[in-house]
Amino acid sequence: MKGSTQMAKVLMVIAVLLSFCLVPFQGYAQSKVITLKVANWFPIAHKQTPLLESWCKDVEKRTNGRVKVNYYPGGTLVPAVQSYDAVTKGISDVGNHVLGYTVGRFPLTEVLDLPLGYPNNTIPTKLANAFYAKFKPKEFDDVKVLWFHAQAPGIIHTKSKPVNKLEDLKGMKMRTYGSNAKLMSLLGGTPVAMPMTDVYDALSRGVADGLMCAYEATEGSGLGKGLSFILRIIQPRNQQC
């Protein structure tokens, strides 16, 4: 009986010593800083850039510095087309992706690109977030969706040749992407698929005669000079996540 009591005391001392040993490691784990790589392909002058920058700062502030954000603007970490895959492969932890840049990758969500006649960017943004909240498409199971945002209705912009009616689009090489390419074909233009980041060079080299995008996209991408507003067409824009 006496031996059992002594053994119990020894075990208790060992348990206490082990608990003291664990305290520093637990404290270290709690104080360890988490580093996130946030990739943004939007040009520096684009309105989306300060929005994502402020989100990064807000994350650091709300976590009291326990989360540190390494922010990569202007496509310095990954280009626009690869932004989604970059997150799934661990190249970046957070990214901003245009779903239309990866046609066929998100077949269920492409329903949002049907010609529903969105009058502004607010309505499709609310619709996209409500759509995801209700249906939770499995095509996004490999990432954690933070939010969706959409663009305003597309405007036909051309470099030189004026477009006063739909017939004038025939044969013109118009930059577009995703399901918008199908719409451009129906309107008579020849779709040239490429991300927005490649449009400036495409217009300069004659690869494209114009493009279909919202007003703010031309400003943010530095395309305002040399383009003329010709024709306004209410049409959907690929949602971005």
Image (spheres, grey):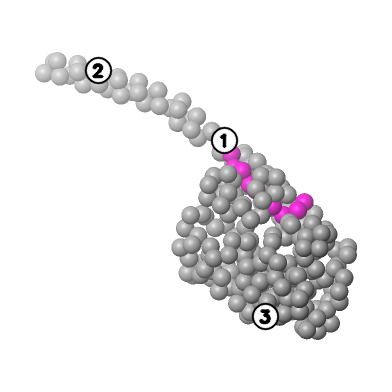
Quadrant of image for the N terminus? top left
Alpha carbon distance from label 3 to label 2? 84 Å
Q: Is residue 211 above or below residue 166?
A: above
Q: Which residue is mark 1?
A: 33
Q: Secondary structure at mark 2?
A: helix
Q: Pointer 1: residues within 10 angstroms few (<14), some, or many (20+)?
A: few
Give the number of the disc on residue 186. 3
Name the image quarter holding residue 45: bottom right
**Looking at the picture, which amino acid does disc 3 mark?**
Leu
Of the two numbered discs 3 and 2 on the same chain, state the one appearing first in sequence.
2
Of the two numbered discs 2 and 1 on the same chain, state the one appearing first in sequence.
2
- Is 131 in the magenta? no
Q: Pointer 2: residues within 10 angstroms few (<14), some, or many (20+)?
A: few
Alpha carbon distance from label 3 to label 1? 53 Å
Q: Look at the image and give the residue range highlighted in magenta.
A: 35-44
Q: Which residue is mark 2?
A: 10
The reply to whether residue 172 is in sight is yes
Residue 154: % across, % down: 73, 73
Report the side of 168 relative to 70 (left or right).
Answer: right
Q: Nearer the viewer, mark 2 or mark 1?
A: 1
Q: Is residue 24 above or below residue 215?
A: above
Who's the residue at 36% across and 26% down the image? 19
The reply to whether residue 151 is in sight is no
